Amino acid sequence: MEILRVENLKKYYGEGNSQVRALDDISF
C-alpha cells in the first residue's frame, strides 16, 4: 500500500523571466 506517491514534480526557480513557480505540475 502506497501512502504517498508523487509524479511529475517540477520546481522552477528564476527560470525564464525571473519567474518562480515552485512545485508546479504536482500529482498525488
Image (cartoon, helix red, strand yellow):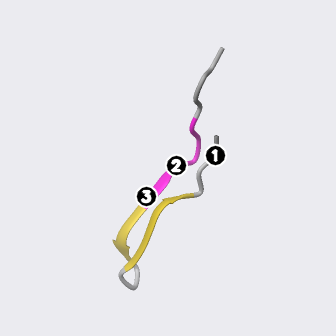
Which dot marks residue 11?
3
Amino acid on which disc 1 is placed = Ser
* Residue 17 spot, x, y in % from top left: 39, 85
Which residue appears farthest toward the bottom when viewing the image? 17
Outermost front residue: 3
State yes or no: discs 2 and 3 in contact (Cβ < 8 Å). Answer: yes
Point out residue 13 in the picture as x, y percentages from the top left corner. Answer: 35, 67
Please give the range of residues in magenta. 6-11
**Quarter location, residue 2:** top right
The residue depicted at 37 percent of the width and 74 percent of the height is 15
Which image quadrant is residue 22 in?
bottom left
Q: Residue furthest top?
A: 1
Whether label 2 touches label 1, CB < 8 Å: yes
* Residue position for label 1: 27
Report, in whole angstroms, how far the alpha carbon at label 2 lies from the one at label 1: 7 Å
Q: Residue at x 60, y 23 (%)?
A: 3
Q: Position of residue 8 (x, y in %)?
A: 57, 47
* In the image, residue 21 above or below residue 23: below
